[in-house]
Amino acid sequence: MKAVVVYESHWGNTAEIARAVAEGIGPDARAMTTEEASAEAVADADLLVVGAPVIAFSLPSPRAEDAVAATAAEAPTPPTMVKPSMFWWLADLPRGTAEAAAFETHIRWSPGGATGTIERDLKKKGYRVNANSGKFVVRSRYGPLREGELERARAWGSALRPRFGQH
Ligand SMILES: Cc1cc2nc3c(=O)[nH]c(=O)nc-3n(C[C@H](O)[C@H](O)[C@H](O)COP(=O)(O)O)c2cc1C
């Protein structure tokens, strides 16, 4: 059994959550950037977990890349520019039938968000999305994560485990 947790992350918060989710799923899970998660890397996954930050109320759109780049002067650390962005990674994802789940990091709940779009794209490609999405909170625009979020991410990951037959 194999699980892949794919993420987009500019300041590392979503990456930290992705690693905690993978830990929670168990030893057969690996967290990967969109660049690492090639079509071959996810082709034989039994569980595909996909996560991104909320930028401008949604999954980062192609235009959000400019907004992210524009933060370089004010952000505490320059953003990692992600290639491909999750938007394009999902567009290029081959069809599949594995179980899948989505998560996001954000400052606060807002209309929109990233998980709805991720789940819709996964379902369009044939993936089975049955688990509730994971929503994890940062303390300010660039992080850090709110206290307790890594534990919540591990717990959310371990709740996904029975969905693909690991016990
Ligand atoms: C340009 C920009 C726009 C953002 N827009 C939103 C937003 O609409 N809603 C929200 O809850 N958080 C928003 N955030 C906060 C990010 O979602 C949050 O910092 C996220 O955890 C960053 O993840 P990363 O460190 O993995 O890149 C925004 C942050 C930036 C820099």
Image (cartoon, grey):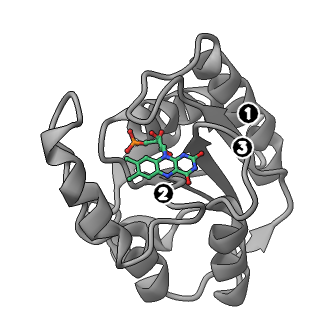
Given residues 123 and 14, the one toward you in this image is 14
Disc 2: CA contacts within 10 A as few (<14), some (14-19) or many (>=20)? some
What amino acid type should be assigned to the residue bearing mark 1?
Answer: Trp
Marks 3/1: CA distance? Answer: 7 Å
- Contact, mark 3 vs mark 1 (Cβ under 8 Å): yes
Q: Nearer the viewer, mark 3 or mark 1?
A: 3
Per the rendering, the mark at residue 55 is: 2
Mark 2 or mark 1, which has the lower sequence index?
Answer: 2
According to the picture, the residue beneath numbered tag 3 turns out to be: 134
Does residue 10 appear left or right of residue 117 in this picture? left
Picture quarter containing residue 13? Answer: top left
- Indicate if the residue with disc 2 has its beta carbon within 8 Å of ligand 1: yes
According to the picture, the residue beneath numbered tag 1 turns out to be: 156
Given residues 78 and 9, the one toward you in this image is 78
Residue displayed at 36% across by 48% down: 9
Q: Nearer the viewer, mark 2 or mark 3?
A: 2
Residue displayed at 51% across by 61% down: 56
Mark 2 or mark 3, which has the lower sequence index?
Answer: 2
Q: What percent of the width, then of the height, locates residue 74? A: 20, 37
Residue displayed at 76% across by 42% down: 160
Residue displayed at 76% across by 51% down: 133
What amino acid type should be assigned to the residue bearing mark 2?
Answer: Ile
